[in-house]
Image (cartoon, rainbow, N blue to C red):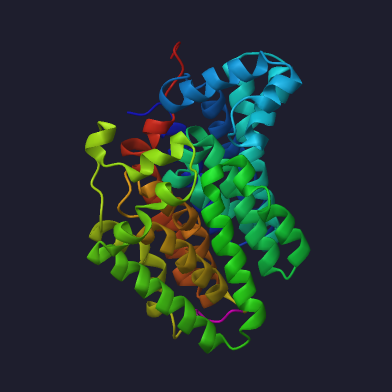
Amino acid sequence: MHPLLIPYALLTALFVLHFHQRDRRVGSAGVAVVAVAMLALLSAAMVLRPARGDSGRYYEHFLHVRSLDFSGMMQYERMDPLFKLLNWLVGQLGQSSELFFSAAFVLFVGVIIWAFHRLLGARQAAALFMCYAAYPFFITYGANGLRQGLALACMLMALVQFNRGNMRSGALWLLPMPFWHGGSLLGATVVALYVLMLRYVPRAQQRWRIVGILYAASVMLSVTGLNEALLGRLPDIIDLEARHQGYFLSPDELGTVYQTGFRLDFTLFSLTPLFSALLLRHRGEMFSFRASGWWLSIYLALNCIFHLFSFAPYSDRFSAYSWFLMPLVLFMQIRASGNPWLRSAFIVCVAAVNIIMLQFYTGNSIRPPEWW
């Protein structure tokens, strides 16, 4: 049994009880308190986890960067200058893994919660955070994929700002993405093109036609294998860093076992928000760009990245740009339906799934400390 399972399950049960509290003020306060307690639990687990695997490699990088002077740090490698700067600044305060992990996680989760609050307000932001609490793409990128995790947090805030009509603020949040994680230039480019489409294509029907055609084309390229023929030669055209060139090698060349190419299971999972929108289309404006349709359309646009690079080893990392948004998209759809029964069923189902995920999947990214 995972060490966090019992306290996590208890907090989840309290969340469900408070969410269904008839007194709205009491319920809102209860949900907020439980969300804060859950955040404290996850933060402690993230900070105290042993520096092994990807976490260990990040920690070794941190120790090296902190030993350099500022000039040496700036000249060290070409990689991700904002992440490198974060390592150096934190390193001036100490060298413990707890200090490094806490700084990265506080920045990651702080931006995400801020984005939720800007979009939904305090009560619903707390409820949405509880939906994310054991979601694999939240835990994985908060614990192991630190560089991409920080880029995803910036992307989320940028999308919230764009959704609220704050174009300048959205652009300022989008701009740092590639500087946290070079590969996130893909996600930033798709978001920028999506915002341009919204500006120059005024009619919702035309927007959906563009998104639908591009999505269908990306899936067909993946099914036929033409995506590899078109994009597999990028290293010959673009000067990629050595760490990015691995995505264009075969699993055998990397010495790993990974199923590349079109994945029906991944595709069906990716389509979950679209299926739910079709099921709920008579209960609310599921495809309206004034409601949850805005989030569904950007989700589908970002999911094209996964299909275009399905030939690459660890292609699920390309899916992170869309899958990271899935709980938010589903939450917005349930919210737009205005149906209390559906809202209740969604919260209960997500709570149960998160407990199961923590025990059998997500918990692998949150290992107990050595003294446990």
Look at the image and tell me in which quarter the N terminus lies.
top left
Which quadrant of the view contains residue 127?
Answer: bottom right
Task: Measuring from the top left, give residue 323's x and y in whole percent.
Answer: 44, 55
Whether residue 120 is visible: no
Which residue shows up at 62% across the image and 77% down it? 198
Q: Quadrant of residue 360?
A: top left
The stretch in magenta equals: 285-289
Q: Position of residue 276 (x, y in %)?
A: 39, 72
From the viewer's perspective, is residue 338 above or below residue 260? Answer: below
Would residue 109 be found to the left or right of residue 2 on screen? Answer: right
The question of residue 98 being in magenta is answered with: no
Determine the main secondary structure of the stretch shown in magenta.
loop
Tell me if 152 is positioned left or right of 115 in this view.
left
- Image quadrant where residue 94 sits: top right
What residue is at 25 percent from the left and 39 percent from the top?
251
- Can you see residue 208? yes
Residue 228 image position (x, y, % from top left): 31, 57
Name the residue nearer the viewer: 349 or 206. Answer: 206
